[in-house]
Image (cartoon, grey):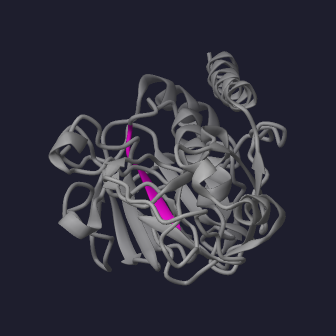
Amino acid sequence: MTIQVRRPGLLSTLQDLGRYGYQKYGVMAGGAMDGFAHRAANRLVGNDDAEATLEMTVTGPVLYFEEPALISLCGSDLSPRIDGIPIPSWRPIYVRAGGTLQFGSAREGCRCYLAVSGGFNVPPRMNSCSTYLRAGLGGFEGRALQADDRLLLKPATSLGKRMMRRLSEQSPEAPFSAPAWRVSYEMVPDYKANPEIRVMPGGQYHWLEEAGRKAFFESEFKVLPQSDRMGYRLSGTPLYMAKPQELLSEPVAFGTVQVPPDGHPIVLMADRQTTGGYPKVAQVMTADLPLLAQASIGSRIRFRLVDLKEAQAALLRTEWNLDLLQLSIQMFFQ
């Protein structure tokens, strides 16, 4: 089973949950920027969360399906169409052989995830199929998709096969078919253009001068064009330390907010380095990382301080929603 890439889009790469266990050797974790959309897309087609999905940024590719497939699209709404007919997101979709999937402009967010039942058949590198562009590692030949690439697919999962049989009987003349239901709006992150991001204090939060701590939570910060999968560079009221202090490089994480000497924060994202030497003033709570990942260039972000208890409660709600989604699909397609 193969998908032909007719047009690659702006940046389309295969990503999974990330490459863990090698950060002590300087190999960053990487993985999907919007982990919720990646996992929901996989569960909608009967996959494990660890299967790679296609992460499409701002402008999606044009893909031709040589064989029938069960797919799902989650995350940003990039105006997807099959053979010119708009298709819904956040639900399983049966695509008939010969269908062409293409995308228009982004209506919300900037990253959409395409999952295929069974997954993409690419060899794992260091226990992951995530693409690390700077090292040319993983994914499809270590790079973003190009025109005329051919993506091999694994056989559909047993649940995926049941879903395909059911959906293939609907609208046999149409190029695709999908159920009437979708993932509940209450479960999906609110991908606002200008999101509020909840953070906890970082190790060097108290190094900030008082005016800086106040500005961090009362000002807006704009996402600059220099932002990428490694980090979001923000502009706004400069944040300065109360006094100059030196800091040895320390481990950093997805969502660590660093402040370099110029006072403009950097939020480390999926392709972050393994250590950093700038003061860490905050840590984005895990449940809000998808909101940040979907913030596009020019978005304006506000930060809100929360404690560990609120961050853990939000993460538990996210995990509960994903488990409820998986259980509902299994019951519907028994």
Res. 194 in view: yes
Name the residue at 30% across, 51% down.
274
Whether residue 66 is visible here, answered yes or no, is no
Horizontal and vertical percent position of residue 257: 55, 56
193 left or right of 41 in image? right
Instruction: Say left or right for 4 vs 49.
Output: left
Q: Residue furthest front?
A: 243
Q: Please count the marks in the image.
A: 0
Position of 45 relative to 245 (above/below): above
Residue 93 horizontal/vertical position (percent) = 61, 47
Residue at x 29%, y 51% (from the top left corner):
28
Magenta region's main secondary structure?
strand
Q: Is residue 55 magenta?
A: yes
Q: Position of residue 36 (x, y in %)?
A: 60, 42
Depth check: 49 or 202 in front? Answer: 202
The residue at the point 30 percent across, 58 percent down is 131
Residue at 64%, 67% in the rendered image: 80
User: In front here: 332 or 105?
Assistant: 105
Direction from residue 247 to residue 43 in the image, left or right: right
Q: Which residues are magenta?
A: 51-57
Residue 332 found in image quarter = top right
Quadrant assignment for the C terminus: top right
Query: Is residue 138 covered in magenta?
Result: no
Q: Quadrant of residue 169?
A: top right
Residue 114 screen position, x and y as percent = 51, 54
